[in-house]
Image (cartoon, rainbow, N blue to C red):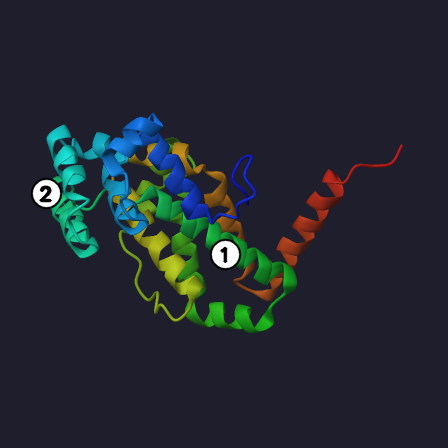
Amino acid sequence: MYLNEKNIRCTPVLLKNAETARSIWKSESSYLEDVKDVSYGKLKAILPILDPDFIAQTKLPTAERKNLLSELTKATYEEVLARVRKIRQEYDPASLAIDLDQFYSDLHSINSCLEAVVVKQDLETLKLIRSHYPSNLINDIRILLAALRSEDAFQKLEESLPKEIRGLLRDENDVDMWLSNIVKALITLRRGTSNSRERVRQRIGVSKFGELSTLLKAVLSDEELERYKRGRELLERIRKPTLA
């Protein structure tokens, strides 16, 4: 993935961070006025707090935002993290706001990884995933993903949505870490408001939820894997232009 008009390779989370920064600072002059010479680590730590979606959801006062920015240059990275935690505890005590940039990055990463595993039929990784995630756990995750397609879907599925997901996530590899982060965000969104879910749909797009659900189903068993491959091959044939 490349930045527009720049031959610079960039990870999805960096691109999302850049988009969030543009939504916070409408001009280069305002950006430089607030965070000139601030390290990327500090900047990344405060982006979720300054995100317009977080401010709208938590009613973070302008004075709090200005105070945070004024402290950046002199504060250490650890002090900035502590300040961010304090703001979250005060204005989002129920932890209903999520880091949308990180959520997007985790979705992109796990989708890319699982697609490669499925397409290449990486049997060793498939065996590892199946040993970590039984079918009932995968199905719970998939129903949470299905509920995010629209608010109508959420209302229809709400009574059957799990309030928590147990038995996961040992953080033994990247897939564990990504899926753990995603599940935490999904449970948070389940507890959140319709507005918070709609912001996620607009910022991230529902296609990534559908893609992850499909890939999780594909890794459940050899039968589902073959069904996924046949569907993928059919789509590729349909998309392939025919010669006149």
On-image quarter of the N terminus: top right
Tell me the SS state at disc 2.
helix
Q: Where is residue 54 in the image (x, y as percent from the top left)?
A: 24, 36
In the rendered structure, find residue 216 and report the number of the disc placed on it.
1
Tell me the SS state at disc 1.
helix
Classify 189 as above or below 202: below
Q: Where is residue 131 in the image (x, y as percent from the top left)?
A: 46, 72
Q: Please state if 20 lies on the left or on the right of 222 as rendered.
A: left
Depth order, front residue of 142/174: 174
Q: Position of residue 187 (x, y in %)?
A: 29, 49
Quick check: can you spot residue 199?
Answer: yes
Residue at image coords 76%, 40%? 240
Q: Which of marks 2 and 1 is in front?
A: 2
Residue at image coords 72%, 39%? 239
Residue type highlighted by circle 2: Glu
**Residue ID for mark 2:** 90
Residue at image coords 18%, 54%? 76
Residue type highlighted by circle 1: Leu
- Give me the C-alpha separation between circle 2 and circle 1: 37 Å
Q: Circles 2 and 1: CB distance less than 8 Å? A: no
Q: Position of residue 244 (x, y in %)?
A: 89, 32
Q: Quadrant of residue 196?
A: top left
Residue at image coords 26%, 38%? 35
Classify 173 as above or below 85: below
Q: How crowded is mark 1: few (under 14 residues within 10 Å), some or many (20 or more)?
A: many
Q: Please state if 152 lies on the left or on the right of 37 as rendered.
A: right
Q: How crowded is mark 2: few (under 14 residues within 10 Å), some or many (20 or more)?
A: few
In the rendered structure, find residue 1 and report the number of the disc placed on it.
none
Q: Residue furthest front?
A: 37
Q: Which is nearer the N-term, disc 2 or disc 1? A: 2
Quick check: can you spot residue 153?
Answer: no
Classify 139 as above or below 1: below
